[in-house]
Image (cartoon, grey):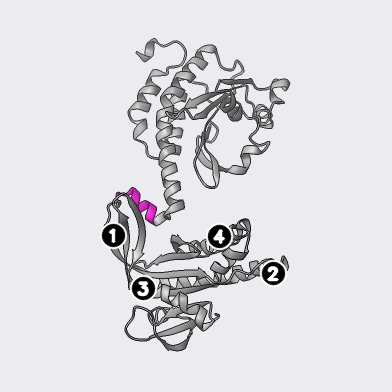
Amino acid sequence: MSGDEDGWRLTPVLTWILGEGRLIRKPAVFVRQLCCKLTEAGAQIWRFGIDVRTIHPRFAFWELTWERESGRANEKSTSDDVVTSIEYLGTAAQLVRETREIFRCRLGDPDQDARHPSLAFLAARGGKDLVALPLVFSDSQINVLVMATDRDSGYSDLDLAKFMTLSTFLAGLIEIYAAQRTALALLDTYVGPRAGRQVLKGQVRRGEGRKIDAAIWLSDMREFTALTECLPQASLLEMLNAYFEFINAAVTAHGGEILLFIGDAVLVVFPATPRGGRSQACKAALEAAHDATHGIATVNMRRTRAGEPAIDFGIGLDVGEVIYGTVGAPDRLNFTVMGRAVNRAARLQNLTKDLGRPVLTSAAFAACIDTPAESLGYHPVKGVLKPQEILVPKGF
């Protein structure tokens, strides 16, 4: 059948997409192989791109690109700021989204190249013709398929007709890739990367979980209730987000993962690895605590100069075996950690207020680190029968 086609052969490419191609798990690998198939079929592809509007707290677009010289396919995410920038406004992708129609540009024509710097850039590198087509998802969202050639004659009407058919076949598969990326991004954002991977692996039934050794961090802002009464809402949210941002940067840099934001409190888990054990997990948690306290101290200097209230918080650190899994109502679940170490970390955090120290640890945690720790004596801990030894690591 493909041998009866006029021009280059689209049929074997579509057959590949519906068969072998749809089984490729990585989008960049799919695009690279697709462009190889198009080239083998005789299509004049010099540059190839797919531009997808995405749901993400930090990124507006997800892009897949390929160029013939390198033979490589790349993917990148573009920040929300680009939507209103010259980098995006006036591009082929923006015009296709706005008009929902095909965009065509004969590269090398000064009037055409002047429409956007990206077109002049392609022309300067030898491009002769560019076409951008709507890639329509099932929810009517318009995304964009872009192809360019360096062939002097450019694209024919037959080429454009075949590209339109290609975009129809590609839309469903690219939508699946985009949905998978969105699901992963939202899980990473709302439950954390490790927990998100567990959910994607199917750990979604209430009561499912596994036991792990981990260092547990629980931090809480001080005087937050009073601040909610006196600060304007915008200032309160800005302060809270600045606090959360520094905590997140500190813990993720050392392998920790935020599992829950509970009001102004943060629950973090540092899982022990088979190689490093509890000692490595506790060391990572302690280094993260240093980074967080020092980082926010710098922020507080700036806030004080601006007449804004300082961010004051305490951290409780413990270590032990915890259950890492799913709890909640049948149709409203949460991924979290549970166990004595979590409860003790919460109690230690509360004691930071009474004992006037920003970071407190249990004896079990202190025994796992090389840093000397000062004992503050034995103190009653809510929910624990006997008074517990409370320690503060050197430097806090």
**Residue placed under numbered mark 2 in the picture:** 304
The answer to whether residue 100 is above or below residue 334 is above
Q: Main secondary structure of the magenta part?
A: helix
Q: Earlier in the sequence, mark 3 or mark 2?
A: 2
- Whether residue 394 is visible: no
Residue 245's tag is 4
- Which element is circle 1 on? strand
Q: Residues within 10 Å of mark 3 (few under 14, many from 20)?
A: many
Q: Which residues are magenta?
A: 195-202
Q: Are marks 1 and 2 in contact (CB under 8 Å)?
A: no
Q: CA gap, disc 1 to disc 4?
A: 28 Å
Q: CA gap, disc 3 to disc 4?
A: 25 Å
Residue 293: give x, y in percent of width and height. Answer: 57, 71
- Which element is circle 3 on? helix
Residue kind at label 1, given as amino acid type: Gly
Q: Is residue 322 left or right of residue 135?
A: left
Residue 209's tag is 1
Quarter containing the C terminus: bottom right
Q: Earlier in the sequence, mark 3 or mark 1?
A: 1
Q: CA gap, disc 2 to disc 4?
A: 19 Å
The answer to whether residue 90 is above or below residue 358 is above
Residue kind at label 2, given as amino acid type: Thr
**Residue placed under numbered mark 3 in the picture:** 341
Residue kind at label 4, given as amino acid type: Glu
Residue 354: give x, y in percent of width and height. Answer: 50, 82
Residue 281: give x, y in percent of width and height. Answer: 41, 70
